[in-house]
Image (cartoon, rainbow, N blue to C red):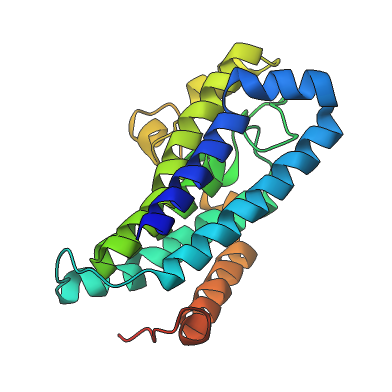
């Protein structure tokens, strides 16, 4: 279990430390943007490989016994997580790497970004949180909890970094969107437009969900049971 704890701390430290502090700016200034991204990618691959290996090797130490409600929670939540991930990868998002707000856009936020300006992060966070609750053991808490902490902390870190840089149009985009899903819509700062998400993305999200359920026993050794 010690190896898993150290791997989790390394994973969080390298991601948050390199990407969300002044160290990133210093490395970019000394190495250049391209070499920095290459270095970051190599460290990220090493970190996640170590984390996965340590999790698979960790002993099972039960912290709580999930009832039927918690065990089935991923079946209910994962379709929404898949939709967030599909939309994050297929729609324009000013918080994504290499993208920025369009200051001349009539609608500063469209599609899933109306729901949350961090769809990728919230997709990962939902996946991680429901798997912590559904498993109930220490290794799962450390493994999935690491991803949940990274994703949720990442939403704040991205907002802070972009606000400091203040690219054109960021202030309007920030005002019209929310980090917490649906908050901007509930506060009437935005509205849900389902047509901007579209049927193809819904189908793709459903296909991803079905594939994950089918492949779950082969990838993770545990069958998903209704």
Q: Where in the figure is residue 32, as x and y percent of width and height?
A: 85, 26
Q: Position of residue 48 (x, y in %)?
A: 57, 56
220 lies left or right of 195: left
The relative height of residue 174 versus residue 83 in the rendered view (above or below) is above
Specify the farthest residue to the front. 2
Question: Could you tell me which residue is drawn at 55 percent across and 65 percent down?
Answer: 202
Q: Quadrant of the N terminus?
A: bottom left
- Residues 213 and 207: in front is 213
Observer able to see residue 103: no
Q: Is residue 77 visible?
A: yes
Q: Work out which quarter of the rendered image holds the C terminus and state it.
A: bottom left
Q: Does residue 223 sit above or below 92 in this rendering?
A: below
Q: Say which of 24 and 190 sits in front.
A: 24
Task: Indicate the quadrant where residue 223 lies.
Answer: bottom left
Depth check: give the residue in front, 36 or 170.
36
Q: Position of residue 87 (x, y in %)?
A: 60, 54
Q: Position of residue 113 (x, y in %)?
A: 55, 40
Residue drawn at 50 percent across, 73 percent down: 209
Q: Which residue lies at the image location 62% right of the left edge and 31% below the top edge?
A: 18
The reply, left or right, for residue 118 in relation to residue 58 is: right
Which residue shows up at 48% across the image and 52% down it? 7
């Amino acid at each position: 279990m010690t190896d898993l704890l150290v791997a989790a701390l390394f994973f969080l430290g390298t991601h948050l430390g390199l990407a969300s502090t002044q160290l990133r700016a210093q490395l970019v200034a000394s190495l250049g943007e391209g070499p920095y991204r290459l270095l970051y990618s190599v460290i990220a691959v090493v970190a996640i490989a170590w984390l996965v290996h340590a999790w698979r090797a960790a002993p099972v130490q039960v912290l709580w016994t999930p009832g039927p409600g918690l065990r089935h929670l991923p079946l209910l939540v994962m379709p929404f997580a898949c939709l967030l991930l599909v939309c994050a990868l297929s729609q324009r998002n000013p918080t994504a790497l290499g993208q920025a707000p369009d200051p001349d856009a009539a609608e500063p936020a469209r599609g899933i970004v109306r729901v949350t300006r961090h769809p990728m992060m919230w997709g990962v966070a939902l996946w991680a949180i429901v798997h912590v609750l559904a498993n109930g053991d220490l290794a799962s808490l450390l493994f999935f909890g690491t991803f949940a902490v990274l994703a949720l902390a990442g939403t704040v870190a991205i907002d802070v970094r972009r606000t400091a840089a203040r690219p054109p149009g960021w202030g309007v985009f920030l005002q019209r969107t929310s980090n917490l899903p649906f908050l901007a819509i509930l506060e009437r700062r935005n509205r849900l437009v389902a047509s901007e998400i579209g049927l193809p993305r819904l189908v793709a999200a459903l296909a991803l969900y079905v594939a994950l359920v089918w492949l779950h026993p082969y990838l993770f050794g545990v069958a998903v049971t209704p």
